Image: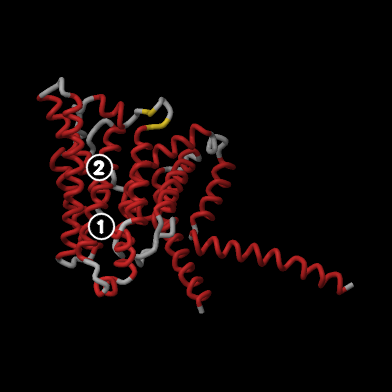
Amino acid sequence: MSQPAEMQQSLVRPPSRRVLRFIQQLFIQLGVLPFLLLVALVVFTAISDHFLSAQNLINVVRQSVYLIIVSLGQMLALLTGGFDLSVGTIVALTSVVGAMAMAAVSAASPDNVWLAIAVGCLAGVAAGTLVGVTNGLGVAVFNVQPFMMTLGISSVGFGIALYLTGGVPVYGMPPQFGQVFGFGRIGGVVPVPVIVAIVICALTWVLVNRTALGRYFYAVGGNVKAAHLSGINTRLTLFLTYTLCGFLSAVSGMLLTARLETGEANIGASMPLESIAACVIAGVSLRGGVGRVGNVVLGALFINLVQNGMNLAKIESYLQTVVLGALLILAVIADQLRLRLIASLRD
């Protein structure tokens, strides 16, 4: 009787080992994201019948645009071994400056609608990019730690945004701005913000994977001293990193302003946590030098998917913040486990 039992065990073990190895390889290559995504789909589908409906999924994609764009900028900072805590400030300051400039031109020249929109967008993006330039100068030129530099700039920027508005939303923008860039659709199907996000994702992928600057991001994040000895201008690379991060956050800020149809000084407060969480969940290492554009896009989609599921489950917004923070901690722990697993396989 014992021989058949032993034969059955020998037949069962190989498939189970293959499954475990497959899961292990999936975890090493993609991180914790696929497993969290699977859990989220199962849990929220069981809670709400509307979760996997086509309309709800389209809404998730549309709502994810703003976080996706900010997360791509955050990824660049993480690749170089730093991070940007001022992305929320950039979104808010961009919204305020862009809305004020647009409203001023619109009031002075009501017939030149698209001139007002163009001036407002340029002013808003320029203001946000200027914050990124300031971060870049502090980190690259004055060797200020990214944490302290971006944290300080975050406080300064929010203070300026509140001072400019007095805490009151900015109105007076042309309605065409919101109609086109907030609610417009190409061919009546694809939202304009989604098209903008797709273009930015494609350009970021080319930058990271097909240019010398993209290779420099990984090199600086992997070992800044080795990168410097290899002839890479590490200061310029860091400066461009935070400038690009500021630019991408500013673009997201203008799109979000079009969606809200007002300039708001208090938007974007959750962007630093959400963008870092999206990147870490997507497998971007906090130590620098590791990360993929496609995974970050999926990470941002996952964050909004979870928020959408919690809304359908009628979970309070305060508890949603708790869940988001827990996901970030879980992702960091998973990243450490993944690094240990990779090191053990090399040994």
As drawn, the label of residue 268 is none
Disc 1, SS: helix
Q: What residue type is labelled 1?
A: Thr
Q: Is 132 drawn above or below residue 11 in the view shown?
A: above
Instruction: Classify residue 208 as left or right of residue 48.
Output: left
Whichever of callouts 1 and 2 sits on the residue coming sooner in the sequence is 1
Mark 1 nearby-residue class (10 Å; few <14, some 14–19, many ≥20): many
Which residue is identified by label 2? Answer: 266
Q: Which residue is drawn at 34% across and 29% down?
A: 183
Which residue is identified by label 1? Answer: 241
Q: What residue type is labelled 2?
A: Asn
Tell me residue 291's x, y (percent): 39, 59
Q: Residue furthest right?
A: 1
Q: Which of marks 1 and 2 is in front?
A: 1
Tell me residue 33's x, y (percent): 49, 55
Disc 2, SS: loop
Query: Which picture quadrant has residue 250?
Result: top left
Query: Which picture quadrant has residue 119?
Result: top left
Q: Which residue is drawn at 29% across and 37% down?
A: 255
Q: Is 30 drawn above or below residue 250 in the view shown?
A: below
Q: Which of 105 and 48 is in front in this view?
A: 105
Instruction: Classify residue 303 as left or right of residue 255.
Output: right
One can see residue 319 in this view: no
Q: Nearer the viewer, residue 191 or 45?
A: 191
Q: Nearer the viewer, residue 192 or 52?
A: 192
Quarter containing the N terminus: bottom right
Spatial separation of the CA atoms under disc 1 and disc 2: 25 Å
Tell me residue 234's x, y (percent): 23, 66
Query: Which picture quadrant has residue 177?
Result: top left
Q: Residue at x 44, y 35 (%)?
A: 59
Tell me residue 74's x, y (percent): 32, 54
